[in-house]
Image: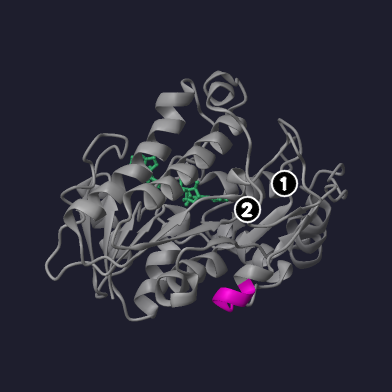
Amino acid sequence: MKVLLTGGTGFIATHVLDQLLQHGHRVVTTVRSVEKGRILLDLFKGRPVSYSVVGDIAIEGAFDAAVKSDPPFDAVIHTASPFHYNVTDNKKDMIDPAVLGTTGILKAVKSFAPSVKRVVITSSLAAMNNTKHPPKVYNEEIWNEMTMEEALTTTDAQAAYRASKTFAEKAAWEFVQTQSPNFSLTVLNPPMVYGPILHHIVSLDELNTSSKRILNLIHGKPRSGPVGSPVYVDVRDLALGHVLAIEKPEAAGQRLFLTAGMATEKQMGDIIRNTFPDIAGNLRDDLVADLPPYGIDNSKSIRLLGIKYRSMVETIVDTVKSLQKLGA
Ligand code: NDP
């Protein structure tokens, strides 16, 4: 297939790109600048990948040129969306790029890329996080019930991020329901994503948000806010999930919660202590061992995609090794 992948410079997207190529697909990926595109091509030298420059995805029509291609695209994977907590304006910094980026790519595909039959969007467990009616078990039926008014006024940057993912995913489902496009939609809802870092970063300060969590753990950095969710997935399993979602007919029209399970701070700390005795001394001694008061159900993703999730040990060990290579 010929695939358009948005946000190819990201932590997750670089793995998606890698696995698309491993599966024999040809890929065009969107990046924000020529410089970022060149760096990406260098990383995948000699493989069938090219890039298309798309600036801010919140701008109307941002994807209109990128979706046109010769030969035309068969599938689109939309991962680009802000995931950070440096928010000063919830709407401008978070909600607009997430929501308008999502509706923008869907509109562009519908208008200018009729050959596209499959669209996959990277949503998040954030779009499922329901604090108003906490479920006993998280599965694909569960939705974050935050209102737009709450999203616009919250001073909690993490809540603003969760809102951005919720409204973006809702907009995507609404688009396919109301616009009856020529393509089917699959939405993937991963929790915290860990694993080796493939994408280019100049320094560890630029590390993506979820990888920073493991970096902070191995540096013994005091927790600045509440304990984050222990629900996680390996980036390699998630990337494969994106590829299978465009390949498998049974994934069409589905919302899929991709998770390997739960990894508490204490469990991750124990794995690090056992495997990396040289950094064991850095670990904080107040690592949280408690599991949250809910369960998780990943059976639909296993059934429909056939994913075999990696073990927690493999994920955490490979994340730490990768961070060490980057100078952590
Ligand atoms: P990264 O920050 O590594 O990647 C984000 C990507 O989106 C980058 O390519 C970035 O471009 C691009 N992007 C962000 N904002 C804009 C914008 N306004 N205009 C154009 N491009 C933009 O994050 P991840 O790889 O971790 O996240 C990728 C996706 O996965 C996101 O949709 C995120 O919400 C979702 N996700 C991530 C999880 C995780 O734990 N990592 C968990 C659940 C979901 P640039 O590199 O130029 O900044």
Q: Front-most of 261 and 253?
A: 253
Left or right of 125 on screen, residue 291: right
Q: Which segment did they paint magenta? A: 302-306
2 and 1 marks in contact (CB < 8 Å):
yes
Determine the residue positioned at 81% across, 66% down: 274
Disc 2 Cβ-to-ligand 1 distance below 8 Å: yes
Pick the residue in front: 184 or 313: 184
Locate residue 47, reporting x and y percent.
27, 75
Is 66 one of the magenta-colored residues? no
Residue found 54% across the figure and 65% down from its top: 238
Label for residue 191?
A: 2
Residue 284 at x, y percent in the picture: 81, 43
Front residue of 318 and 158: 158
Relative to 173, residue 168 above or below? above
**Which quarter of the rendered picture does the N terminus lie within?**
bottom left
Rendering quarter of residue 183 = bottom left
Residue designated by label 1: 229
Q: What element does badge 1 sit on? A: loop
For mark 2, give the secondary structure: loop
